[in-house]
Image (cartoon, rainbow, N blue to C red):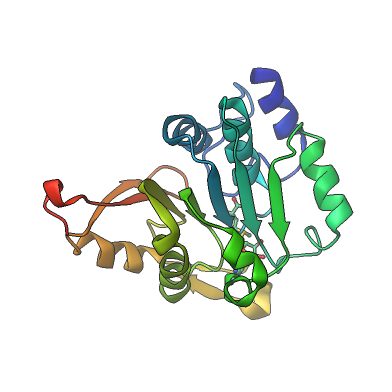
Amino acid sequence: MRAWIEQLFEFPGLEGMGHGQRVEDANLGLGWLYYALGRIVRPRTAVVIGSFRGFVPLVLARALADNAEGGLVHFIDPSMVDDFWNDPAMVREHFASFGVTNVRHYLMTTQEFAESPAMAGVDEIGLLFVDGFHTEEQAAFDHALFAPRMTDDGIALFHDSIRDHESDIYGKDRTYRHTVMRYMDRLKRDPAYQVMDFPMASGVTLVRRASSREGGR
Ligand SMILES: C[S@@+](CC[C@H](N)C(=O)[O-])C[C@H]1O[C@@H](n2cnc3c(N)ncnc32)[C@H](O)[C@@H]1O
């Protein structure tokens, strides 16, 4: 695993983007949490929405591949930052260069995905990672789209979920505010959900549906 992480960090962009990684000691940072959940939940299906260079889809795909039963990561990203995800052959090659062959990429927004035939093929989701357009409205849309297709023990993770701030990732003339934390605040007030923040780096919040025994619905 250490050699794999060291190889990961050689690729520009996989050592950053707010997951608290540290190159010096091959430390995945919050990536350990993603990897651990992949091994604990053992989902047959994971969905990842948005990634700059593939850190989360790579780590989750590796976790699922390390499970005896395997599993598939559906990765949705319309490549809005640059053209990195535009060419399907290059996308396949990117993942394969890290020994990862269980990622299926969709070059579309989640809104487009919802209307596509691919939507029907995504079910029994054990892990959902929401890291696309970081507004309250989009986080709520992404969650509402996939929550009905999650397993009872499924967990949703929301990245960039702990602070309200301005981002210029889509260009200086297209700045926008990250407001995912406002959606997290809504979920925290809803007894149907258990919600836990990990406020390290850019932060990630874990959300799971509470069972009736736990006081939820
Ligand atoms: C830049 S990433 C955020 C960085 C991320 N924390 C990481 O680890 O790489 C956000 C990604 O979300 C994608 N995105 C933006 N709007 C989206 C949408 N509506 N549906 C799906 N993906 C979206 C963008 O193409 C971009 O690649």
Residue at point 64% right, 29% down?
23
Quadrant where ligand 1 appears: bottom right
Residue appearing at x 71%, y 65% in the figure: 81
The image quadrant of residue 173 is bottom right
Q: Is residue 173 left or right of residue 127?
A: right
Q: Is residue 110 above or below residue 65?
A: below
- Left or right of 24, for residue 91: right
From this viewpoint, is residue 84 visible? Answer: yes
Q: Position of residue 197 (x, y in %)?
A: 32, 48
Whether residue 179 is visible to the viewer of this picture, yes or no, is no
Is 175 drawn above or below residue 91 in the view shown? below
Q: Quadrant of residue 120?
A: bottom right
Q: Position of residue 207 (x, y in %)?
A: 33, 52
Whole-percent x, y for residue 99 in the image: 76, 31
From the top left corner, tell me how far across and down residue 38 is, in percent: 50, 35
Identify the image quadrant of the N terminus: top right
In this rendering, the answer to whether 153 lies above or below 49 is above
Name the outermost residue toward the bottom.
173
The residue that appears at 32% across and 62% down in the rendered structure is 184
Q: Nearer the viewer, residue 3 or 152?
A: 152
Residue 202 in the figure: left or right of residue 15 = left
Please tell me which residue is depicted at 58% across the width and 34% down the height of the picture: 64
Q: Quadrant of the C terminus?
A: bottom left
